[in-house]
Image (spheres, rainbow, N blue to C red):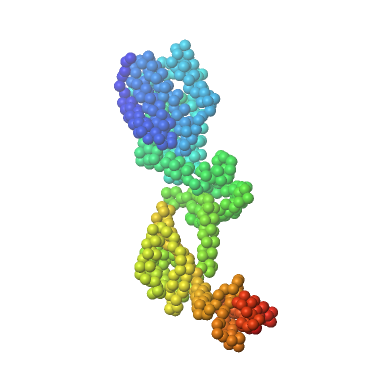
């Protein structure tokens, strides 16, 4: 091999170094979507440019022909890397499995081209004829191309056009934050191929000089700016895929003509079908599956607006928080609309349950109040105000039992009460508190700890109801019982059977016995018992008998008194008979 120096290789050598460096940088960030195929694309460019440098340096036909063959490793890899990159940037579609038949079809032309390049018997399919001639200040390889070469050219330009279409479509749907990056990629790819077209159709001012590798110098600068200056592999993939793709909220992007240009997976799941079915359709297309949403999206809406929309799904109502905002470019011009939909059904159900609970507490006849762990009152319901006379403004923030302290209970009793609560135990029983007016109120109820999500005690809930009247009634009953018990204990009386009692009055004649029985009857009748707001009157029927010749023994005397008692009952009760 013989070589001759030409300064034209300097920009090419620099381009090869830049694209190689960028390829290494991308490989280090290969976890980002699109990084691997773009790294391979840059590596293919580096190989092509470096081999073309050596072709230009070649001083004879064999040297130039060899390095022209070497270039094809990079040349055939370019369209494949380009398709791979444009199919996955800025999304994560590179992780999908490609169909084997499609991969085989895409590899057919590149493999056929490499076979024709490296097997001498098939060289005429690429180079029908080639020779070296002087073109300006250097020697160039002039070639007449074969059929496989032109098939590969058509294949390459077809992949270029299709890949550019994919990239442009995604650019149209993408966030303005990285549209400039996509434009830089298109420039990086199109400029070399424009130079390639000039070379193939012999429009170059230096015949035989392939301008494609020189175009890659521009590509290297554009990609370096996009990757390093705009952080292409940091912003677009992470922001778009990790954040948007995994959002629970449905995300829909509209352009300035109200057409759907992007949906995330949550939105696709919400509307059904596939994402491709919705792209390009007007926002009114939502009316097919969700009329309420279509009605909620105004034709012209301000920078920010929000609301709530509902949807019937399988017999149940789902509720969604709707947020609409304008998308603007760097100059502040509106270029689209962003719609966010978040399912708030569970939140609304919980809120409704809490509202029902609040209503139940507010309308409860029981006095309900809450305190923090230090005993400061944080909430009272209306029944508390009715019971004690204090309003929320007067007691919230005050310490209990200080504000309700009656003076009946000792400090030790209160301390025991709080220690029991702090030990995570519910306390039940009666307390005597004092109302705002100074009245003593007997309450019965319970107090129990309130826990947070970690199980820590954060406060206490008390439920009380007034038992003052019931306690007073019980006191009166007990007093009456004590009074009757004392009366009975003072008399020589005993139970005769069931509800019958016998009273023996020795050394008393019949007339005195009748008077004693009447006094006993009147005493009982004049001592009513108050209970539960009512007055109960107890009466007795008394039968009196005296010892005589006709009643010689105690058994006969009791029988005679029993018959007299029955006559008193039959005569209207509350009577004394003999």
Tell me residue 316's x, y (percent).
60, 51
Report whether 499 appears left or right of 79. Answer: right
Outermost right residue? 570
Q: Quadrant of residue 28?
A: top left
On the rendered structure, is 173 left or right of 208?
right
Determine whether, in the image, residue 308 is placed left or right of residue 417.
right
Compared to residue 485, the image places residue 250 above or below, namely above
Residue at 61 percent across and 80 percent down: it is 539
Name the residue at 33% across, 14% down: 1
| Vertical placement of residue 220 versus 446, above or below | above
Q: Give the residue at the far top of this rendering.
A: 121
Q: Position of residue 338 (x, y in %)?
A: 50, 49
Residue 180 visible in the displayed image? no
- Which picture quadrant has residue 180? top left
Front position in the image: 294 or 175? 294
Residue drawn 50% across the image and 30% down it:
97
User: So how many labels did they put on this image?
Assistant: 0
Quadrant showing the C terminus:
bottom right
Which residue is at a point 51% across and 68% down the rendered structure image?
Answer: 366
Position in image of residue 557 (x %, y %): 62, 78
The residue closer to the viewer here, 332 or 564, is 564
Where is residue 59? Give x, y as percent: 34, 17
């Amino acid at each position: 091999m013989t070589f001759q120096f030409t300064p034209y290789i300097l920009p090419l050598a620099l381009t090869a170094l830049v694209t190689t460096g960028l390829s290494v940088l991308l490989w280090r960030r290969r976890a980002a979507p699109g990084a691997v195929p773009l790294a391979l694309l840059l590596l293919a460019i580096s190989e092509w440019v470096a081999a073309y440098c050596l072709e230009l340096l070649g001083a004879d036909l064999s040297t130039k022909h060899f390095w022209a063959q070497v270039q094809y490793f990079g040349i055939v890899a370019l369209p494949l890397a380009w398709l791979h990159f444009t199919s996955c940037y800025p999304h994560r579609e590179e992780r999908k499995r490609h169909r084997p038949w499609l991969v085989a079809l895409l590899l057919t032309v590149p493999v056929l081209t490499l076979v024709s390049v490296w097997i001498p018997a098939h060289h005429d399919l690429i180079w029908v004829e080639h020779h070296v001639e002087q073109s300006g200040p250097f020697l160039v390889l002039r070639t007449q191309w074969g059929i496989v070469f032109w098939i590969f050219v058509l294949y390459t330009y077809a992949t270029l056009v299709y890949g550019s279409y994919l990239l442009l479509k995604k650019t149209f749907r993408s966030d303005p934050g990285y549209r400039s990056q996509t434009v830089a990629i298109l420039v990086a790819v199109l400029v070399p191929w424009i130079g390639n077209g000039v070379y193939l159709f012999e429009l170059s001012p230096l015949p035989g000089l392939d301008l494609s590798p020189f175009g890659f110098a521009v590509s290297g600068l554009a990609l370096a700016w996009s990757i390093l200056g705009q952080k292409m592999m940091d912003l677009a993939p992470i922001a778009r895929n990790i954040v948007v793709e995994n959002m629970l909220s449905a995300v829909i992007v509209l352009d300035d003509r109200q057409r759907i240009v992007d949906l995330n997976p949550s939105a696709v799941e919400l509307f059904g079908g596939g994402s491709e079915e919705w792209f390009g359709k007007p926002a009114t297309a939502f009316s097919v599956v969700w009329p309420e949403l279509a009605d909620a999206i105004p034709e012209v809406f301000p920078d920010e607006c929000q609301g709530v929309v509902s949807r019937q799904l399988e017999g149940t109502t789902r509720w969604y928080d709707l947020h609409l905002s304008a998308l603007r470019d760097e100059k502040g011009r509106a270029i689209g609309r962003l719609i966010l939909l978040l399912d708030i059904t569970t939140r609304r159900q919980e809120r409704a349950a809490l509202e029902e609970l609040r209503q139940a507490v507010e309308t409860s006849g029981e006095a309900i109040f809450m305190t923090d762990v230090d005993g400061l009152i944080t909430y009272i319901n209306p029944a508390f105000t009715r019971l004690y006379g204090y309003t929320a403004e007067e007691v919230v923030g005050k310490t209990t039992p200080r504000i309700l302290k009656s003076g009946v209970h000792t400090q030790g009793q209160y301390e025991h009460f709080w220690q029991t609560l702090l030990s995570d135990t519910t306390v039940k029983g009666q307390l005597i508190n004092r109302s705002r007016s100074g009245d003593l109120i007997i309450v019965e109820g319970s107090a129990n700890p309130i826990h947070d999500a970690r199980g820590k005690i954060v406060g206490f809930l008390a439920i009380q109801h007034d038992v003052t009247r019931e306690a007073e009634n019980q006191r009166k009953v007990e007093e009456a019982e004590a009074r009757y018990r004392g009366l009975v204990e003072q008399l020589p009386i005993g139970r005769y059977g069931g509800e019958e009692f016998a009273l023996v009055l020795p050394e008393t004649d019949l007339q005195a016995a009748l008077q004693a029985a009447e006094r006993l009857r009147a005493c009982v009748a004049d001592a009513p018992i108050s209970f539960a707001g009512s007055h109960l009157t107890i009466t007795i029927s008394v039968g009196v008998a005296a010892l005589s010749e006709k009643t010689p023994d105690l058994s006969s005397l009791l029988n005679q008194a029993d018959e007299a008692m029955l006559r008193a009952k039959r005569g209207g009760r509350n009577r004394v008979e003999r």
